[in-house]
């Protein structure tokens, strides 16, 4: 992170000037920003400062997430007449998801596009958003995310942790890669599986009988290659951009978790910008996350074809119920001890 500091200090000097051009009230958080219509010609920014936003991500170039960030930068350039630009640090070059979340809170970076691990780190009472086997499908996840529970989580992130949630993009369902087929829930016990650096994933897959090893995403391929783990799980973009088809023989398709990328900005940085820039950022984020979600859905068939061409065999987890039955004791404990803000019945009712 030190290598960013000299660049970020220059950014801070620009923001000090920008603060005089705008209000400093904390941004309001809502369920999800409404997609604004394209603004056409750039707004009049002649008297506004040039600003560079330093964006970190654990994800690889070529993924829908990074293409979405590129779109975000393109839109900001159009809306600001070129006054707002992005510097993007991809592929975990500034650290893993946990390190990036902590750096974002401290203002060492301005913005990050990561998964949902920051929810478990900063607002653990809402970490059901970061847990497998909670939501039925994409629509169920998004209904809860855009409802009162999602609103409350984003408010807590903002007020207690200096993190402003710009929006989310859908990455698709997570699947399991392995060197042996998964034909029933009992086969999970044969796996030494890489999980995100999330206790919830470890506890859940542990309840299914797997041996869980938390490994940062940039280290996943090498860990599989060296035999540190023999399985992993994640959405197709993760499986393909990390070339897991070179070191894994099977992919088990499932719907135990709908994966998103959460885009957050350091709230102090955001509040220090002129009001016109804050509006542009909100509009561009809404447009870019919608674009990236649609792009990811279009890319999924192509990504699956790449795995098939590489010789991967596909299995399918057609019946989730045996898995749900096996993890139920762990889930009951999570609701009682980790998630006091809700109940299984409340989430199921969405």
Image: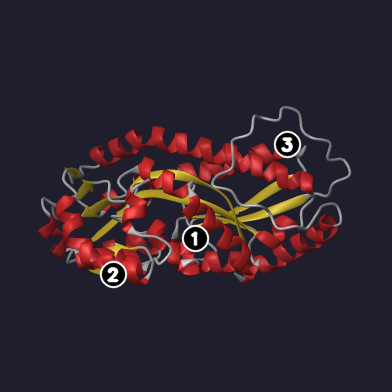
Residue 260's disc is none
Estimate how packed mark 1 is, as few (under 14), some (14 to 19) or many (20 or more) residues with alpha carbons within 10 Å. Answer: many
| Image depth: mark 3 or mark 2 in front | 2
Which of pointers 3 and 2 lies earlier in the amino acid sequence? 3
Q: Can you give x and y, in whole percent of width and height, for residue 172 in the image?
A: 37, 43
Q: Please tell me whether mark 3 sits on a helix, a strand or a loop.
A: helix
The quarter of the rendered structure image containing the N terminus is bottom right
Question: Between marks 3 and 2, how big is the CA–CA gap?
Answer: 48 Å
The quarter of the rendered structure image containing the C terminus is top left
Q: Please tell me whether mark 2 sits on a helix, a strand or a loop.
A: helix
Which of pointers 3 and 1 lies earlier in the amino acid sequence? 3
Which of pointers 1 and 2 lies earlier in the amino acid sequence? 1
Decide: marks 1, 2 in contact (CB < 8 A)?
A: no
Estimate how packed mark 2 is, as few (under 14), some (14 to 19) or many (20 or more) residues with alpha carbons within 10 Å. Answer: few
Q: Can you give x and y, in whole percent of width and height, for residue 327 in the image?
A: 21, 62
Question: Between marks 1 and 2, how big is the CA–CA gap?
Answer: 33 Å
Which residue is outermost to the right? 47
Residue behind mark 1: 92
Q: Is residue 79 left or right of residue 318?
A: right
Q: Please tell me whether mark 1 sits on a helix, a strand or a loop.
A: loop
Q: Is residue 105 left or right of residue 249?
A: right
Residue 79's disc is 3
| Near-viewer residue (270 or 345) | 345
Residue 333's disc is 2
Q: Can you give x and y, in whole percent of width and height, for residue 220 in the image?
A: 35, 61
Question: Between marks 3 and 1, how big is the CA–CA gap?
Answer: 29 Å
The part of the image, by quadrant, that contains residue 231 is bottom left
């Amino acid at each position: 992170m030190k290598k960013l500091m000299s660049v970020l200090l220059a950014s801070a000097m620009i923001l000090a000037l920008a603060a005089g051009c705008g209000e400093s009230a904390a941004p309001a958080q809502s369920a999800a920003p409404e997609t604004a219509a394209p603004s056409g010609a750039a707004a009049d920014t002649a008297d506004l400062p040039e600003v560079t936003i330093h964006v970190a991500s654990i994800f690889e170039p070529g993924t829908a997430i990074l293409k979405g960030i590129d779109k975000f930068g393109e839109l900001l350039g159009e809306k600001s007449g070129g006054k707002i630009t992005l510097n993007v640090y991809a592929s975990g070059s500034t650290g893993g998801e946990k390190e990036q979340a902590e750096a974002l809170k401290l203002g060492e970076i301005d913005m990050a596009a990561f998964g949902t691990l920051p929810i478990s780190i900063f607002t653990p009472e809402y970490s059901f958003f970061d847990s497998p086997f909670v939501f039925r499908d994409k629509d169920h996840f998004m209904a809860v995310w855009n409802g009162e529970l999602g609103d409350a989580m984003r408010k807590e992130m903002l007020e207690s942790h200096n993190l402003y949630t710009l929006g989310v993009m859908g990455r698709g369902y997570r699947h399991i890669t392995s060197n042996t087929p998964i034909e029933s829930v009992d086969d999970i016990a044969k796996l030494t599986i890489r999980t995100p650096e999330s206790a919830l994933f470890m506890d859940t897959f542990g309840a299914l009988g797997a041996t869980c090893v938390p490994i940062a995403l940039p280290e996943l391929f090498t860990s599989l290659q060296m035999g540190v783990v023999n399985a992993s799980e994640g959405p197709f973009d993760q499986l393909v951009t990390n070339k897991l088809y070179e070191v894994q023989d099977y992919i088990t398709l499932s719907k135990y978790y709908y994966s998103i990328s959460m885009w957050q900005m350091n709230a102090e940085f955001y509040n220090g910008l002129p009001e016109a820039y804050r509006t542009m950022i909100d509009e561009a984020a809404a447009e870019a996350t919608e674009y990236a979600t649609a792009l990811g859905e279009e890319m999924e068939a192509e990504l699956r074809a790449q795995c098939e061409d590489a010789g991967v065999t596909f299995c399918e987890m057609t019946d989730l119920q045996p898995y749900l039955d096996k993890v139920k004791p762990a889930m009951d404990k999570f609701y009682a001890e980790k998630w006091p803000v809700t109940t299984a019945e409340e989430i199921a009712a969405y």
